[in-house]
Amino acid sequence: MIKFLWSYFKNYKAALAVVAVCSVLTAALNLLEPFLTAKFIDEILLSKDTAMFRDFILLLLAISSLAIAAHWFNTIFSSKVRLEINNSVIESVLQSVHRARGDFIFRTDMVYLSKRLDQDAIDLIRFAIDSMTDICINFALLCMAAGLLYSIGLKWLVIFVIIALIHGVVYRRLEKILFERSTAVREADSKYFTCLSDILLYAYSIKLHGLYEEWLKKFRAAFGKNFVAVMRQVKIIFWFSTSSINANAVFKVLIFFLGGVDVLNRELSIGNFVALNGYYLLAMQSVGYFMNIGQGYQNALAAYARIMEIKNLPPETNGTKVLERVESIAVQNVSYSFGEQKIFIGFSKTFERGKIYCLVGRNGAGKSTLINLVCGMLRPAGGEIFYNETPLAELDMIHARKKNIAVVEQKDFIKNDNLSGGERRRISIGAAFEKSADIRILDEPDNNLDAAAVAELIEKIKIGKEGRITLIISHDARLMEIADEIVELKGESS
């Protein structure tokens, strides 16, 4: 995980140094406050010098102002670095998704993945940046506070060590449970968000088909699982927080009891009596940090594991050969299954330049699957596909999809809700026809088009047929009439 993080952090060394300096300065000012308070109390009890009182107020004001300024700079710079590194991590994961095999894209819920990726990146980067400086700062604070406790009296250091050890043992016993429950919360929360998004995305269809109650039942079930996971996590987190509170309460009782006796016996000044609580709280705050860093580390580790799960996806096997011109596509003895469903068993077909092919068949017969196989988005389990006489596995299909293939998808790839369905369809068709491609694939191109627009589309297809291979998925008789060949797909028997 450290190597992974450093690959992003190394470009932000200057900004991270500013964050570290501001954090150290803030910690030093916090440690100085109990000492100054103790000195002030002891001095004011022994002296009535108003100048001393004035100087202390001015010093306290200066320290407070400096602390505020350091905290402000720390907040600004750390936020800037977090946002930029977080986006860099997300970009690198997006590249992994883009390079992944097509079957991953087809089987993955991308709404769930986007929610999961964003949260994991935020948690991982926040932990890394905070812990980078906080570990050193809290270790120094712990040592200095422990030294100050010892300077007041050895017994105070011994009491602190005993309480800190008990606190550590309790934490370690709960660490494994915390990791398991944190992971469960992440999964449950992502699925809850996905269910919520689905209800909103498909609100029209749900309303049209009267399925609100069924979807609401799914939403409530997702909430129920999320609720149980969160509440189980909350119980563990509660014990972490209360262990520190209880430890502080025990020490305070000891301070008032043993410290009170020492004050009465004039073995402890009132200033040091007050400072005891401040030093202890600082020391215990550092101990608490090291105890709770386990919780943060486990959350970060879970986030890192899920990010690497995506980054380590098997990449699409991509060849190196580039074809200047595609004369034919030969699908030879191809087999393909989607899960348990067998789509093709030994399917063969050759598509030639200058011809129009219309692919027909029932839903699930393999029309879209065949297109994805031809485009290299899916790879066959058996058999081979050849462009000219070159196996598809040897071709640079990333280049081919960009230069040699033009596709009109069934659902238009246009993010503009102000356009009508027909307008979006015309734009998609126009973009595909403007592309000088050897292979033109039209998936239900007549969707949302009126009769005049379909007639115009047919003329364009006929005019451009000689220079390319044209594959059309459609049951529209008007489009079938211009096809040189009707290819009927029947699923397993294809």
Image (spheres, grey):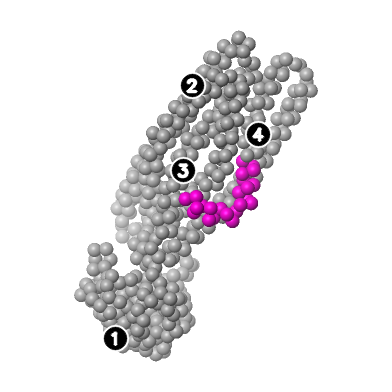
Q: Is residue 8 magenta?
A: yes
Q: Which one is earlier in the sequence, the residue at label 4 or at label 1?
A: 4
**Relative horizontal placement of residue 30, taking residue 7 as reference (left or right):** right
Which residue sits at x=55%, y=47%? 129
Q: CA distance from mark 2 to mark 3?
A: 28 Å
Question: From what the image shows, is residue 266 above or below residue 422?
Answer: above
Q: Which one is earlier in the sequence, the residue at label 4 or at label 3?
A: 4
The residue singled out by tag 2 in the image is 250
Q: Residue furthest top?
A: 265
Which residue sits at x=75%, y=16%? 47
Q: Residues within 10 Å of mark 2 (few under 14, many from 20)?
A: few
The residue singled out by tag 3 in the image is 297
Q: Which one is earlier in the sequence, the residue at label 2 or at label 3?
A: 2
Q: Which mark is residue 29?
A: 4
Mark 1 is on which residue type?
Glu
Is residue 133 visible in the rendered structure shown here?
yes
The residue singled out by tag 1 in the image is 485
Q: Which one is earlier in the sequence, the residue at label 2 or at label 1?
A: 2
Span shown in magenta? 1-23
Q: CA distance from mark 1 to mark 3?
A: 61 Å
Query: Where is residue 198 shown, x and y percent of the image?
Result: 38, 56
Which of 360 and 108 lies nearest the eye of the viewer? Answer: 108
Q: CA distance from mark 4 to mark 1?
A: 82 Å
Label 1 secondary element: strand
Eye-nearest disc, 2 or 1? 2
**Relative horizontal placement of residue 348, taking residue 90 as reference (left or right):** left
Q: Is residue 121 magenta?
A: no
